[in-house]
Image: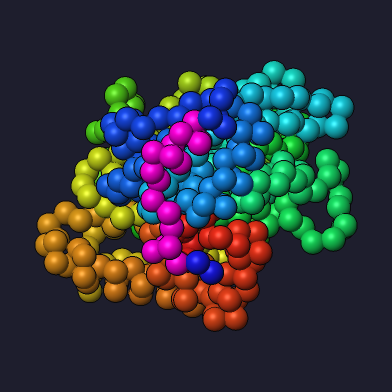
Amino acid sequence: MSEAKDFTKIEDTHTAAITEMISQGEVITEEEVRKKYGSDYTEDFVFAPDLLVKPKTVEEIQKLMKYCSENRIPVTPIGSLTGLSGGALSVHGGVGLSMEKFNKILKIDEDNMQVTVEPAVITQVLQEEVAKKLLYYPPDPASRGSCSIGGNLAENAGGPHAVKYGVTKDFVLNLEVVLPTGEKIWTGANTLKNATGYNITQLMVGSEGTLGVITKAVLKLVPLPRKNMLMLVPFTSAEKACEAVAEVFKAGITPSAMEFMERDAITWTLKYVDDANLTIGNEVAAHLLIEVDGNDEGQLFDDCEKINEIMEAHGAQEVQLAESEAQKDQLWFIRRRVGEAVKSNSIYKEEDTVVPRYELAKLLKGTKEIGKRYGFQSVCYGHAGDGNLHINIIKGELSDEDWNEKLPLGIREIFELTASLGGTISGEHGIGYVQKSFLDIVFDDVILSLMKKIKHVFDPQGVMNPGKVFD
């Protein structure tokens, strides 16, 4: 595969040629605008593209990709820039390919419960539009109000409701993709079953923009559940909270969401947001936020009673059941703002670990022990029902030397613990720019070699989002 040093630097002749082919879109050279598109929510990185392009048609993207591939110019697809692994950062310069003009919901097929969308559609906008027709698109990252479907596809995003309904990949039927060489393909069929050849659709989902540019997606929908109930469960032990999670599923109940939040995650959020009316007892160490949904209110009450019994058996304090839609909205508002609140306190690194749910307590305990050895504080929260723990490592009083040189060793230990528990190093944020040095923990040389060969087949010139997943 071609090395980064062989990439072509964009000159005036390239800018002129690209401007001519992007006749309906925009080509932007202003430095301040390019810098704005050079950072996301991944730490404090800024990697501005040398040229920012906002095409308006698929044909423009085809021309652009063909030209850049032939001239060895890097291309980085850019969505809503809400990512947490640096997947949309132009680490090798080149062209930043913003997809923001591809923002239409093209068709809601009520009969087949499918929707065809362009990649810049905001996730929450899609959910609200299909809900008007009593349909439901469940994947819902915390950033659903600002993240785009294209970014969700690139990272195989999940969110709180993945525990019952699945992650993004479970709702993708078919994709229109422009390959790095300029060809346009449809990857599958608009059917619920497809055993026809290799599954290129699922290969594209989670490929982090390294194999092609997604220009349309056909997504599966499900009926909108009419009822839900939400419980907030306080614990004096964070580990006990984690231990209780698996017991709910073993009892035959599948919640629609099951979230874990350490005490600091909530207290920092209450300070960060306005009008958050929630009192936390001094002895509370963690909370579980548990939702059940469906159409039978009686069944939901029965499920809540069983969950309450399980929680009490694991040392929970008094379980609070949200009594109104306003209370539910407030609890979800707090949960969805945790990430921003934690990050507002300090320089940080966020790790996206995931283990079989029964191992969650061991992962949490081990993370805290590793933190003590390396001298860092961590604030943990995440999708407990999936075993998906977001570990936010806070710089706090750590010296720059310890932060830059010793901390990566601690992170490696956390990932090695995760792998030893049967887990892996990213559940929904992706590998991107920041985690690629840790891939050897979960993949041997054979798997990494296969991945690199797949990349080369799709992108022989190595221009598609270079510097991501692996070098």
- Residues rendered magenta in the picture: 3-19
The residue depicted at 30 percent of the width and 49 percent of the height is: 45
Q: Main secondary structure of the magenta part?
A: helix
Q: Answer whether residue 13 is magenta in the image.
A: yes
Q: Is residue 57 left or right of residue 84?
A: right
Q: Residue furthest front?
A: 13
User: Where residue 117 appears, x then y in whole percent?
Assistant: 68, 31
Determine the residue positioned at 45% across, 30% down.
27
Vertical comparison of 92 with 151: above or below: below
Residue extending farthest to the top is 132
Res 139 visible: no
**In the figure, residue 461 lies in which quadrant?**
bottom right
Count of numbered badges drawn on the protein: 0
Residue at 31% across, 66% down: 368
Position of 198 compared to 170: left or right?
right
Q: Nearer the viewer, residue 30 or 344?
A: 30
Please identify the quadrant where the C terminus is shown. Answer: bottom left
Instruction: Return the x and y of residue 108 as percentages of the image width and height.
Output: 76, 25
**Measured from the top left, where is residue 419 in percent x and y?**
49, 74
* Of residues 120 and 384, the one drawn nearer to the viewer in this rendering: 120
- The image position of residue 208, as x and y in percent, is 54, 52
Q: Is there any visible trace of residue 87 in the rendered image?
A: yes
Q: Nearer the viewer, residue 393 or 87?
A: 87
Left or right: 352 in relation to 344: right
Seen at 46% across and 76% down, the residue is: 441
Left of 279 or right of it: where is 203? Answer: right
Report if residue 184 lies within the magenta region.
Answer: no
